[in-house]
Each structure stands twice: as C-alpha cells, then as structure tokens.
C-alpha cells in the first residue's frame, strides 16, 4: 500500500487518518502491477492511512481473524490459484506472496528487486502528478 497526504477531514475528523510516515492526514491505496505487462491490475482504496497496516489490507484482516471471516474483496482472495504476488519483508508469512529470502539465487533477487522498484516508481508518479489528490476532467469525447 501507499499513503497519500490529504487535507484533514472537517466533517469526519479521526485519528485513523493520521499517517505516521508523513506526520499528517492521509489516505492509503493498494496497487498491484502486472509483472510481465505494463498494466495496473489492482486498485483498492481509499482507506484510512493510520488504521490498517499494508499486510492487513492485503489479507483482508489480521492473522488472528480466520480466513473465512476476513474481507473477501482483499487482494489476497482475488489472486487466481497458483499465482503469487511479490512484496517486501512486511508481507513475510503470507502464503501467496514471494519476498526476498536467504538462499535465493542472485537472478531471483534481482528479478524481485526490479519488480518492487517498478512498483515504487509507479507510486512515485501517482504522487508527483497528483493523480489521487484532485479530480481530473478530460474532454467531452474520446477525441480529447
């Protein structure tokens, strides 16, 4: 997940929106990119930035909640059988997420690093171009 700084919500103030990374109000989004194709294949959010850890968002709940009681719309449950996500060490212990580990070949670690860097570049571009900060309105037809 990635957190985006926002203005404070006057109608619904809550400490759940507090983002400790930026020390301000924020919203959390979850994105997934296809590894072999240039597509964003998953977007979920906005969620309160301080309410959920990235692992909790991905799994639809915490480890102490049985899987059948978790949010079934979470990415964990949307991955097809036999498919895996790539993640950083925050996702350790999740059965369908591959992270860098001791004993992996140099090529595998390089592959995971490239995929994770690509994801971070995507997040950076969303922030840099204010994609989720404001509304965007294009022209009235498919021509513009």
Image (cartoon, rainbow, N blue to C red):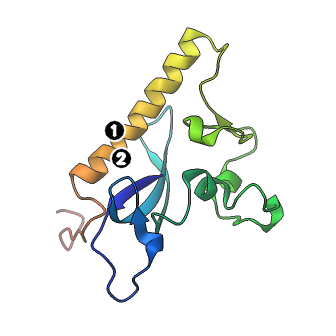
Which residue: 27% across, 59% down?
131
Quarter of the image containing the C terminus?
bottom left
Vertical placement of 45 versus 106: above or below? Answer: below
- Residue marked by disc 2: 123
Foreground: 103 or 44?
Answer: 103
- Residue 79 horizontal side relative to residue 8, left or right: right
Q: Secondary structure at mark 1?
A: helix
Of residue 123 and residue 38, the one placed in the foreground of this image is 123
Q: Is residue 2 above or below residue 71?
A: above
Residue 16 relative to residue 85: left or right: left
Among the 4 quarters of the image, the one containing residue 6 = bottom left
Answer few, some or many: residues within 10 Å of disc 2's Cα (few below 14, many 20 plus, some between 14 and 19): some
| Mark carried by residue 65 | none
From mark 1 to mark 2, how far is it between C-alphas?
A: 5 Å
Mark carried by residue 121: 1
Residues at discs 1 and 2 in contact (Cβ within 8 Å): yes
- Residue 12 higher or lower than 16, as above or below: below
The percent position of residue 61, horizontal first and vertical second, equals 69, 61
Q: Residue at x 50, y 31 (%)?
A: 36
Spot the residue most to the top.
Answer: 106
For the residue labelled by badge 2, is the local secondary structure a helix, a strand or a loop? helix
Q: Would residue 113 appear left or right of 93 to someone viewing this image?
A: left
- Give the percent coordinates (x, y) of residue 5: 30, 62
Residue at 47 percent of width and 25 percent of height: 113
Mark 1 is surrounded, within 10 Å at the Cα level, by few (under 14), some (14 to 19) or many (20 or more) other residues, namely: few
Question: Residue at (76%, 44%) from the top-left corner?
Answer: 81
Relative to residue 49, is residue 38 depicted above or below? Answer: above
Task: Give the camera-side residue of 48 and 34.
Answer: 48
């Amino acid at each position: 997940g990635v957190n985006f700084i926002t203005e404070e919500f006057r109608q619904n103030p809550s400490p759940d929106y507090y983002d400790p990374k930026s020390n301000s109000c924020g919203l959390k989004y979850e994105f997934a990119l296809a590894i072999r194709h240039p597509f964003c294949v998953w977007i979920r959010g906005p969620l309160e930035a301080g309410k959920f850890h990235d692992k909790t968002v991905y799994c639809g709940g915490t480890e102490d909640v049985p899987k059948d009681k978790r949010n079934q719309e979470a990415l964990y449950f949307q991955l097809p059988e036999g498919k895996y996500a790539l993640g950083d060490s925050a996702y350790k212990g999740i059965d369908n997420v591959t992270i860098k580990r001791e004993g992996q070949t140099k090529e595998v670690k390089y592959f995971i690093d490239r995929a994770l860097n690509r994801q971070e570049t995507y997040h950076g571009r969303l922030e840099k171009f204010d994609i989720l900060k404001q509304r965007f309105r294009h022209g009235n037809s498919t021509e513009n």
